Amino acid sequence: MVHSMGIIKISDQVHDDVRRSATVMSRSINAQAEFWIKMGRLAERNPTLSFAEIIQMELDKADLAEGEQDDTVQAIA
């Protein structure tokens, strides 16, 4: 779900960094900013984890969610 909540003011330098990274990562500027915000929030909540560990944690959660969806589809069929 996406909510249009308004404008977040950032410096020109941060905007330029987001734009460059978005291009390299083949993401929209908004998707890149959202990724950085999410990763920053996860890093603050899990200060002992490395970036790679945070990514693995998120992949594991996605695998669990996908498995739950598969179980639901099988139960319906």
Image (spheres, helix red, strand yellow):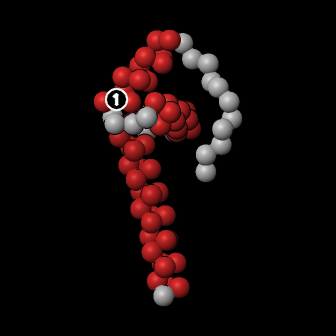
**Nearest to the observer: residue 21 or residue 37:** 21
* Residue that extends furthest to the bottom in the rendered view of this protein: 77
Residue on which disc 1 sits: 23
**Nearest to the observer: residue 58 or residue 10:** 10
Is label 1 in a helix, a strand or a loop? helix
**Nearest to the observer: residue 27 or residue 47:** 27
Asked if residue 36 can be seen in this view, the reply is no
Please determine whether, in this image, residue 62 is positioned above or below residue 10. below
Residue depicted at x 48% and y 18%: 15
When asked about the image quadrant of residue 6, the answer is top right
Task: Count numbered badges in the picture.
Answer: 1
Residue depicted at x 62% and y 18%: 9
x%, y% of residue 32?
45, 33
Residue depicted at x 43% and y 16%: 16
Asked if residue 22 can be seen in this view, the reply is yes
* Residue that extends furthest to the right in the rendered view of this protein: 5
Please rate how many residues cluster around mark 1, counting C-alpha atoms within 10 Å: few if below 14, some from 14 to 19, many from 20.
few
Residue depicted at x 35% and y 40%: 52
